[in-house]
């Protein structure tokens, strides 16, 4: 130890912990003991009031107590403590810091962490903790950040006119007005809300985000193997969720409208994966026409055909006008009547099926309508299968 340096630093009037912290090279169990050793070597008294921390170090047990109190509401296995230190203390610390100094922040983080680990029987984790506790040491405020929970599943949408996600009222932007009956929403319910409500309850999360692997139109049902989704539950208090039970609760709550299957825990990385996924889809489409004899031939002409689709007229107001090529992997007639037929279509991800049928005034080429030389109407559309790595849809 550099006695001269220690003398100069001690002259500021420091508590043992603050003094010891500047000389971590000295062997001792903690900074307080280290400071005491230095003081004894210098033959001086411990300062009554610490110039650096002004008693903050002595309040570590109190701050830990406040943190533990706030953490009692949360389920977690791992945690991390981070504290905010007064600017003035940091400036003072800078003035006396030696090459062997530890920062006051580090000491407080570590010591509070030790108490929490011991009292609550939890593990500190510096990389990916369930909970981050932030303690503002200027006001002893405790803030808790609970890592989101991600739940993967597949949903079936059994009814039409149900949007996938919450749709804010376009007149009031979600604030609530006379047009939306003060709900703030265009549609009373959505797939998102029907799934999220029981999940928010089970996790006691503060909010959620719904990430779908694409979406179907509001008037299109999603049947078959269901569409993959990940529900992100933010700031959850409970994380040991029984997903089998949650699945039952959702299916009871959303009965007749939405069903979920195969719930399992997921991750943020998988959200990106399912959002980018380009999987072929299988549709069932009910169409109306006048020239029955032409339809059969037109359907056959579309098998394996590449079509070019300009952005549909119905979504032009919100999407760029571009032309894209998509392949019709397979198409067949399931049922045919005089002026109505039900077709099964397997197409590449992103194919506009309604426009494939109607032609959208020539914006989709070729279309069933153009090939049949007839006016074709879409009466009903359902997604009946999504082919992904879990659910191969080879043929229809
Ligand atoms: Zn001090
Ligand atoms: Zn409104």
Image (cartoon, rainbow, N blue to C red):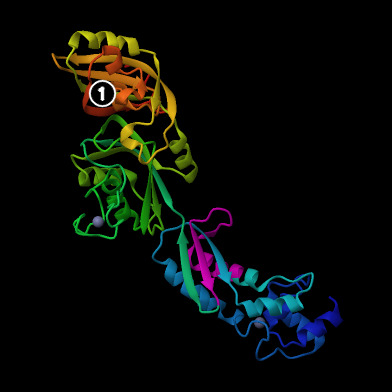
Residue at 47% over, 45% down: 268
* Residue 113 magenta: yes
Secondary structure under the numbered disc 1 in the rendered image? strand
Position in image of residue 318 (x %, y %): 37, 41
Position in image of residue 362 (x %, y %): 33, 22
Q: Quadrant of the C terminus?
A: top left
Q: Which residue corresponds to mark 1?
A: 284
Direction from residue 223 to residue 17 in the image, left or right: right
385, 252: nearer the viewer? 385
Direction from residue 300 to residue 56 in the image, left or right: right
Is the CB atom of the residue marked by disc 1 within 8 angstroms of ligand 2's nearest atom?
no
Q: Quadrant of the N terminus?
A: bottom right
Residue at 73% over, 73% down: 28
* Residue 201 magenta: no
Q: In the displayed structure, would residue 59 be above or below residue 158?
A: below
Q: In the displayed structure, would residue 215 be above or below residue 346?
A: below
Q: Which residues are magenta?
A: 109-137
**Residue 146 visible somewhere in the drawing:** yes
Position in image of residue 122 (x %, y %): 50, 60
């Amino acid at each position: 130890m550099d006695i001269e340096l220690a003398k100069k630093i001690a002259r500021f009037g420091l508590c043992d912990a603050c003094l010891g912290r500047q000389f971590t090279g000295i062997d001792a169990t903690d900074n307080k003991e280290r400071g005491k050793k230095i003081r004894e070597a210098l033959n001086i008294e411990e300062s009554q009031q610490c110039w650096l921390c002004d008693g903050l170090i002595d309040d570590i047990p109190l701050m830990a107590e406040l943190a533990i109190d706030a953490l009692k509401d949360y389920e977690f296995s791992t945690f991390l403590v981070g504290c905010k230190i007064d600017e003035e203390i940091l400036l003072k610390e800078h003035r006396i810091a030696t090459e062997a100094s530890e920062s006051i922040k580090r000491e407080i983080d570590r010591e509070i962490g030790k108490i929490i680990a011991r009292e609550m029987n939890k593990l500190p984790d510096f990389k990916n903790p369930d909970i981050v506790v932030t303690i503002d040491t200027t006001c002893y405020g405790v803030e808790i950040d609970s890592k989101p929970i991600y739940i993967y599943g597949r949903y079936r949408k059994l009814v039409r006119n149900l949007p996938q996600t919450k749709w804010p009222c376009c007149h009031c932007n979600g604030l609530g007005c006379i047009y939306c009956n003060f709900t703030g929403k265009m549609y009373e319910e959505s797939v998102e809300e029907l799934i999220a409500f029981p999940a928010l309850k089970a996790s006691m999360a503060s909010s959620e985000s719904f990430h779908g692997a694409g979406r179907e139109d509001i008037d299109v049902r999603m049947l078959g193997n269901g569409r993959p989704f990940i529900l992100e539950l933010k700031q959850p208090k409970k994380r040991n969720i029984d997903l089998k039970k949650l699945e039952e609760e959702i299916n009871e709550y959303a009965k007749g409208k939405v069903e979920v299957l195969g719930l399992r825990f997921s991750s943020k990385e998988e959200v990106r994966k399912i959002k980018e996924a380009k999987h072929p889809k299988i549709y069932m489409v009910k169409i109306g026409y006048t020239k029955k004899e032409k339809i059969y031939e037109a359907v056959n002409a579309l098998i394996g055909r590449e079509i070019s689709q300009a952005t549909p007229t119905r979504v032009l107001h919100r999407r760029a006008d571009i032309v894209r090529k998509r392949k019709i992997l397979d198409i067949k007639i399931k049922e045919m009547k005089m002026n109505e037929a039900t077709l099964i279509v397997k197409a590449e991800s992103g194919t506009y099926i309604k426009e494939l049928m109607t032609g959208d005034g020539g914006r989709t080429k070729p279309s069933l309508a153009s090939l049949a030389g007839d006016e074709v109407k879409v009466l009903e559309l359902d997604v009946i299968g999504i082919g992904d790595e879990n659910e191969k849809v080879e043929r229809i």
